[in-house]
Image: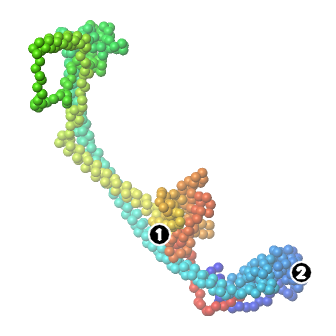
């Protein structure tokens, strides 16, 4: 259409006689020398009934220049601009529909002929579009050449990486073997170190338990005859087994394994483990000095002198004090006989430095250092191999990607473009994703990830489809169609939401520019045929 419109001004105007409202392409149907046959073939009428303001044909073709047939069409010649068909009902309705005013030939309205001015503006617009197309296509050819070169470089890089990958794989396997060889003596030395420490720990623990058992046996052996009897065991009611608060003779004998007494060896081997958790030592803990006790080294404050009393009064007071002291001593003796001393549980060995595994000896540490060095080298080589494998995957994906018929869209692969509206910032990363983010801040919402080319069959690369975005509330996942338009620059020009959760974005790019028609020589302005 662009070529036809640019050719129009070059054509010489030739007047072809035809009825009013008939186009040049249909003028041969209207031969005044013979009857007129309706274009739909429904009837034939004498030619003088054409444009007689009476509708004879069902398709209205006999009245192309009047408003007699509501389904007829009037052709605006619009010399200097684009020809146009309008409904016959608009003929002579007092409104200028044709830019040349030919539709209002009998309405009394004088229409200004604006076709030449419209044609001029149209040609300017078309020329600008043609210029954009030409420049865009020039840039497109550069993009195609750039991709060819870049693709060749990437293929070379891919071959190099694939060759380097084999070398790295061999290196990783070698370092894996060295690492495993270095870890064997390390493990043996560490296991031996731990074993010795655990043996020492077990021996130390057994010794502490033996000491506790010996101490308990000595406390229980009240008569120090070298044996603990049932009666001696009964002095510890905390060992009660039936919950009545007292250790009966039967319960005590049961604890002694059915015997009436036990010696120190049997006590340690059999009895101590059964009573250990309940047993409370008779040894009183040493109380620390009270913080409120006065320091004897500090000088006492001087007390005011007490006035002397008569001798008789002093004697009476001394006798009363002596009686009170005797009563107090008797009370203390009774209390000491009635109230048993508090019992203290056996002190379990608290974790000490010996419970912590000691540092490795020099030889073991040397094995550890050697193994760690081997591990570091292996892990570094393994990371390098993973990086190379990732680079190979990325290159293979990029090289095999469908970037258009000649790879013209490849330059978009690593780019992102944004469009800011009153509410959102839209972001398009071609072949990856589309997102929107509130303009005033907030987390982005996915409008879809790359799906496929989505243009019609004859123009597949005119649109992109991005799918499976963030789900709408009680609705489908968001998706976006990106329409590609020809332009000298790459820019997102608009974003709309034609239907709920389905977005339409327009991206202007030189890669979408078609090959323009050849430029025609300028020979002045001419009217339409």
Q: Would residue 455 appear left or right of 381 to someone viewing this image?
A: right
Q: Residue at x 80, y 86 (%)?
A: 108
Asked whether the viewer can see residue 196, the reply is no
Determine whether 285 is above or below 33 in the image. Answer: above
Residue 140: percent from left, percent from top = 51, 75
- 319 and 384: which one is in front? 319
Asked whether the viewer can see residue 419, the reply is yes
Residue 447: percent from left, percent from top = 54, 59
How far is mark 1 from mark 2, CA to CA?
Answer: 65 Å
Q: Residue at x 62, y 80 (%)?
A: 2
Determine whether 225 is above or below 295 in the image. Answer: above
Q: In the current view of this chain or complex, which residue is farthest to the front?
A: 310
Residue 397: percent from left, percent from top = 46, 61
Q: Residue at x 34, y 54 (%)?
A: 383
Indicate the secondary structure of the residue bearing disc 1.
helix
- 217 and 77: which one is in front? 217
Residue 29: percent from left, percent from top = 81, 82
Query: In this figure, which residue is indicated by the disc labeled 2?
Result: 45
Count of residue discs:
2
Which quadrant, please, contains the N terminus?
Answer: bottom right
- 80 and 198: which one is in front? 80
Q: Quadrant of residue 294?
A: top left
Which quadrant, please, contains the C terminus?
Answer: bottom right
| Label number found at residue 411 | 1
């Amino acid at each position: 259409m662009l070529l036809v419109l640019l050719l129009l001004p070059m054509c010489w105007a030739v007047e072809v006689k035809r009825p009013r409202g008939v186009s040049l392409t249909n003028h041969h149907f209207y031969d005044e020398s013979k009857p007129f046959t309706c274009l739909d073939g429904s009837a034939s009428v004498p030619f003088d009934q054409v444009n007689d303001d009476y509708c004879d044909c069902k398709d209205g073709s006999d009245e192309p220049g009047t408003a007699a047939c509501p389904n007829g069409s009037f052709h605006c010649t619009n010399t200097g601009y684009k020809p146009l068909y309008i409904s016959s009902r608009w003929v002579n309705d007092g409104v200028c529909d044709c830019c040349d005013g030919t539709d209002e030939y009998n309405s009394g309205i004088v229409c200004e002929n604006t076709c030449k001015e419209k044609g001029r503006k149209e040609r300017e617009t078309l020329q600008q579009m043609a210029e954009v197309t030409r420049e865009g296509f020039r840039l497109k050819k550069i993009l195609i050449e750039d991709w060819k070169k870049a693709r060749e470089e990437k293929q070379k890089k891919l071959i190099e990486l694939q060759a380097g990958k084999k070398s790295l794989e061999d290196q990783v396997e070698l370092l894996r073997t060295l690492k495993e060889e270095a870890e064997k003596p390390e493990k043996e030395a560490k296991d031996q170190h731990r074993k010795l420490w655990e043996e020492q720990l077990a021996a130390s623990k057994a010794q502490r338990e033996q000491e506790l058992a010996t101490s308990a046996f000595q406390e229980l052996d009240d008569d120090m005859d070298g044996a603990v009897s049932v009666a001696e065991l009964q002095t510890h009611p905390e060992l009660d087994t039936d919950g009545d608060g007292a250790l009966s003779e039967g319960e005590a004998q049961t604890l002694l394994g059915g015997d009436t007494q036990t010696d120190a060896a049997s006590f340690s081997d059999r009895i101590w483990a059964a009573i250990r958790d309940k047993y409370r030592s008779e040894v009183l803990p040493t109380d620390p000095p009270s913080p409120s006790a006065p320091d004897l080294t500090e000088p006492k404050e001087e007390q005011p002198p007490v006035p002397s009393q008569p001798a008789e009064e002093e004697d009476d007071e001394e006798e009363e004090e002596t009686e009170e002291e005797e009563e107090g001593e008797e009370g203390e003796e009774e209390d000491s006989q009635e109230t048993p001393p508090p019992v203290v549980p056996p002190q379990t060995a608290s974790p000490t430095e010996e419970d912590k595994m000691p540092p490795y000896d020099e030889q073991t540490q040397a094995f550890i250092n050697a193994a760690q060095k081997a591990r570091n080298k292996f892990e570094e080589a393994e990371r390098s191999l993973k990086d190379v494998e990732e680079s190979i995957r990325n290159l293979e994906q990029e090289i095999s990607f469908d970037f258009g018929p000649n790879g013209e869209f490849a330059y978009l692969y690593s780019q992102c473009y944004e469009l800011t509206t009153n509410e959102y910032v839209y972001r398009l990363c071609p072949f990856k994703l589309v997102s929107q983010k509130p303009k005033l801040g907030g987390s982005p919402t996915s409008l879809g990830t790359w799906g496929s080319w989505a243009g019609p069959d004859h123009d597949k690369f005119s649109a992109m489809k991005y799918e499976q975005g963030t789900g709408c509330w009680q609705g489908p996942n968001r998706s976006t169609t990106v329409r590609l338009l020809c332009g000298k620059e790459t820019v997102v020009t608009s974003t709309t939401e034609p239907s709920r959760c389905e977005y339409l974005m327009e991206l202007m790019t030189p890669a979408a520019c078609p090959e323009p028609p050849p430029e025609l020589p300028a020979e002045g302005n001419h009217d339409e045929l």
